[in-house]
Image (tube, helix red, strand yellow):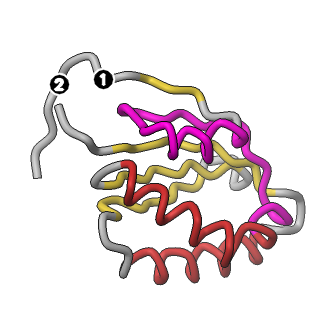
Amino acid sequence: MSDQISWHVELEIRPGQMDAFRALTREMVESTKSERGALIYERFLGDDNQSVHVFERYADSAAAVRHLVAFGRMYGKRFADVADRKRFTVFGTPTPELRRILDPLGARYCAPLAGFSRG
């Protein structure tokens, strides 16, 4: 398999905060487009219009660390004001440095078993 790291995060948007979350998401997407090593950065709205599913993939742990450091600095406070993290599942083999950032976020880890990806 590869050194890529990905995650799925399930969020619940706080009551009355969906407009603020949408605006923040637009900013985060634009900012992340220019990050080296950011491969996938997608958000999906649940049919309840309150849950959001986040899917992100990075070329390696170093790229994920760079992203999370920038995210925390630029968006962390605003993000925490509008959304609650319900589940955070990480796929791949994160480095100890990346785990030090993810562990306090309640991340659960899934190690590679088998498979491939195209594209």
- Residues packed near mark 2 inside 10 Å, few (<14), some (14 to 19) or many (20 plus): few
Residue farthest toward the left in the current orientation of the protein: 118
Residue at horizontal 58%, vertical 27%? 108
Tell me the quarter of the picture where residue 69 sits.
bottom right
> Is 1 rendered above or below residue 43?
above
Residue farthest toward the right in the current orientation of the protein: 15
Could you tell whether 77 is left or right of 62 in the image?
A: right
Magenta run includes residue 85 = yes
Report the amino acid beneath label 1. Answer: Pro
Which residue, given by chain and number where applicable, does mark 1 sit on? 112
Could you tell whether 100 is left or right of 38 in the image?
A: right
- Residues packed near mark 1 inside 10 Å, few (<14), some (14 to 19) or many (20 plus): few
> Is 103 rendered above or below residue 78?
above
Residue at horizontal 73%, vertical 45%? 85
**Residue 72, position as x, y percentages in the image:** 67, 66
Which residue, given by chain and number where applicable, does mark 2 sit on? 115
Q: Helix or strand or loop: what does disc 1 sit on?
A: loop
**Residue 42, position as x, y percentages in the image:** 44, 60
Q: Quadrant of the N terminus?
A: top left
Q: CA distance from mark 1 to mark 2?
A: 8 Å
Task: Report the mark closest to the observer, 1 or 2.
Answer: 1
Residue at horizontal 27%, vertical 16%? 113
> Is 107 rendered above or below residue 85?
above
**Magenta-highlighted residues:** 79-105
Mark 1 vs 2: CB contact within 8 A: yes
